Amino acid sequence: MAQGDWWRHGVVYHIYPRSFADSNGDGVGDLAGITSRLDYLNDGTPASLGVDAIWLSPFYPSPMADFGYDVTDYTGVDPSFGTLADFDRLLAEAHARGMRVIVDLVPNHTSDRHPWFIEARASRASPKRDWYVWADPRPDGRPPNNWKSTFPRAGPAWTFDGRTGQWYLHSFLPEQPDLNWWNPEVRLAMDEVMRFWLDRGVDGFRVDVAHRMARDPELRDNPLVLVGDRDDPTGQVRAMRLAEMGATLFDEDWPEVHEILRRFRRTLDAYDDRMAVGEVYLLDLRRLARYYGGGRDELHLAHNFVFLHQPWKPEAFRSVVNEYAELLPTGAWPAHFLGNHDHARVASRYDEGGNGLARARVGAMMLLSLRGTPFVYYGEELGMRDAQVAPDRVVDVDGRDPVRTPMPWDGSPGAGFSSGEPWLPVAADAGRTNVATERDDPTSMLSLYRRLIWYRKGSAALRRGSYRSLPDAPASLFAFVREAPEERLLVALNFSGEPVSWALDPGLADTGRLEVSTYAARQPGPVQLSELVVGPDEGVVLRLG
Ligand code: GLC
């Protein structure tokens, strides 16, 4: 496998293991299922998707209160997903195909059934007591402070433990008690977890809620200033707005988190070629940029949620990308994504009167041609939409079932995902939106993704070139130049439903050649730069000469 900064140049494919492929017919996807589908992801030829790495959401033993993000054993495999031997096989088979494997690390919290927490809650004198965050009630019996769970339905971030008369902190569900990262033993324990997987050969970690691990040791109240949304019952929106305005929140993004991430980095740096990408859910680019540390001493990559949350407007994406590029320290590299297991699918999110799929094609081109590492959530390459999940099939506490439905491999009743009853319903449009149907259809989303990923692979400018946006482009375009010593490319993305005609600055280039269009019918070939036409909801990559 190619050495060196693979995580800068490759495309990462995000797999939600429960939903990808079920090998034993129990309705839940598993590791052996993933292994059986690796050729789809990359068999070394353009007939496959061509991704360079996979990120696996958690497959560790878990009571599944949050479908694996509540871990009872950081170094095992939940029986519903298989065994450690299945994991080793998956890793070896992925490596044999030149793909790296990133696993999810969930350091902020465990399951309430993790042996550490069981021991911690047994008594105030337990040696593990301080591994979690415990506090006395306020004098009137209320929780220690006003912190809220990230899941609105869970309410306060505190649960009272009757036996020991104290509250414990949980940033998510009560079944997910937060670890106390001020305790050095917790740090040592997580070092061991990381080494366990690194020694097994994993190539990196996706660090769950990386911005949460450290918090105010004095547990002070978050400021509760009303900024609109007076009626929001959860207070979450208010808190978010405050953070955007630069206010200090006491339950996240605490300075000590950077010391923890430097520690993670030291652990990773003791191995060759490993990386960490953080889920840093901060909607403030300045704060986000700090998670790269000095550029080479904290996270290798941080997922940019500001990018994910933009409205479908060219100037919105342009300003996030440009601002972020200015804020990142030297040596730091962006990471872009448009969807994951917590957020609406692109074809649904941006749909306005039926153009969701056309916009998703433009989104795919943007993702795969910007400067930065692209992360593709499973099924996005098929143009999956948010599925309808009937009330009696709802299983997630936070409304995320629609984006986690089974990967549709074919048009059969179980969608080729499972021979049994899938844990979440197969999406209603799986009869046409599936791998078998799209594979041989040159106009499909899958064909576009394949074309873009393989084109990117062969393009020095897209993989590692510089980025410069063209602010003088017509208002409905997001246009930028990617340049490497070998080549210069212009990417023009039309965010409107109207055609745009653009007379390019003659100083930019003499000749242009269309390389890829999101329109399947538009063939590569020379184009007039004095009158470049980009169609409604079309994106193009041009080679400049
Ligand atoms: C992250 C995960 C999400 C999970 C939460 C708690 O936000 O992406 O799925 O529910 O952390 O672990």
Image (cartoon, rainbow, N blue to C red):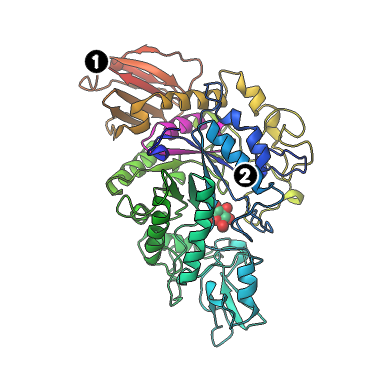
- Residue lying furthest left in this view? 507
Q: Amino acid at mark 2?
A: Phe
Quadrant in which residue 284 is drawn: bottom left
Is 378 included in the stretch rendered in magenta?
A: yes
Magenta stretch bounds = 360-381
Q: In the image, residue 86 lies at what x, y percent?
A: 66, 43
Left or right: 272 with respect to 23?
left
Residue to which mark 2 is pinned: 87
Q: Residues within 10 Å of mark 2 (few under 14, many from 20)?
A: many
Is the shortest distance between ligand 1 and the CB of mark 1 under 8 Å? no
Q: Which residue is mark 1?
A: 510
The amino acid at mark 1 is Asp
Rendered image quadrant of residue 322: top left
Q: Residue furthest top?
A: 526
Work out whether 68 lies above or below 250: above
Which is nearer the N-term, disc 1 or disc 2? 2
Q: Residue at x 51, y 35 (%)?
A: 99
Q: Evaluate whether residue 402 shows in this view.
A: no
- Residue 126, horizontal then vertical, whole percent: 59, 80
**In terms of depth relative to the viewer, which is nearer, 499 or 304?**
304
Furthest-right residue in this view: 420
Who is closer to the viewer here, 269 or 42? 269
Report if residue 237 is visible in the image: yes
Q: Secondary structure at mark 1?
A: loop
**Which of the two residues, 403 or 72, is positioned nearer the viewer here?**
72
Give the residue at x 35% y 43%: 333
* SS at badge 2: helix
How far apart, in angstroms, are the residues tagged by discs 1 and 2? 53 Å
